[in-house]
């Protein structure tokens, strides 16, 4: 049994540590951001699921996503309102209340659509 140190607790480091520990090795995982929240919300790509199908074998709720629309920038003259974001999410199959969108927008320190609007245009 080897004693192994892994620096980096991201997906690769965590998976490597898990596999080595299952094989009977003593594993120490070092990462300064172990409690960080992933921006993808724990999502897995289809490639990860194909390579590691056991990742879906648990009782945690999950929803398979078949397509994604990334909004990297918005029309500054007409930014999306909370209501418009709710509509887009609901059309994509994610029932969500407006108050939830507003709550997370505020938690992320994102201004309202009125405040984000560029009135000069």
Image (tube, rainbow, N blue to C red):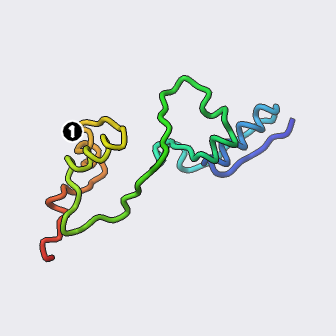
Question: How many residues crowd mark 1 within 10 Å: few (<14), some (14–19), many (20+)?
Answer: few
Tag 1, which secondary structure? helix
Q: Is residue 2 left or right of residue 13?
A: right
**Residue at the farthest bottom position:** 120
The quadrant where residue 97 appears? top left
Q: Position of residue 104 (x, y in %)?
A: 29, 44
Q: Position of residue 59 (x, y in %)?
A: 54, 23
User: Picture coordinates of residue 79 (x, y %)?
Assistant: 22, 61
Q: How many marks?
A: 1
- Relative vertical location of residue 58 with respect to residue 118 in this rendering, above or below: above
- Quarter of the N terminus within the rendering: top right
- Side of 45 where 87 appears, left or right: left
| Relative depth, front residue between 45 and 41 | 45
Residue 95 screen position, x and y as percent: 31, 35
Observer-nearest of 110 and 57: 57
Q: Residue at x 25, y 42 (%)?
A: 103
Q: Residue at x 15, y 76 (%)?
A: 121
Is residue 82 rendered to the left or right of residue 50? left
Give the residue drawn at x 48%, y 42%: 65
- Determine the residue located farthest toward the top in the rendered image: 59
Hey, which quadrant is residue 14 in on the image?
top right
Residue 29 vs 63, above or below: the answer is below
Q: Is residue 72 left or right of residue 81?
A: right
Residue ID for mark 1: 99
């Amino acid at each position: 049994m080897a004693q192994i140190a892994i620096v980096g607790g991201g997906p690769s480091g965590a998976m490597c540590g898990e596999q080595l520990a299952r094989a009977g090795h003593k594993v120490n995982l070092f990462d300064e951001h172990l409690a960080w929240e992933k921006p993808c919300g724990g999502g897995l790509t289809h490639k990860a699921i194909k390579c590691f199908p056991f990742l879906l074998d648990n009782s945690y709720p999950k929803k398979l996503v078949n397509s994604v629309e990334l909004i990297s920038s918005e029309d500054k003259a007409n930014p999306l309102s909370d209501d418009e974001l709710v509509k887009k999410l609901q059309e994509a199959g994610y029932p969500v209340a407006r108050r939830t969108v507003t709550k997370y927008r505020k938690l992320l320190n994102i201004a309202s659509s009125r405040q984000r609007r560029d009135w000069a245009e």
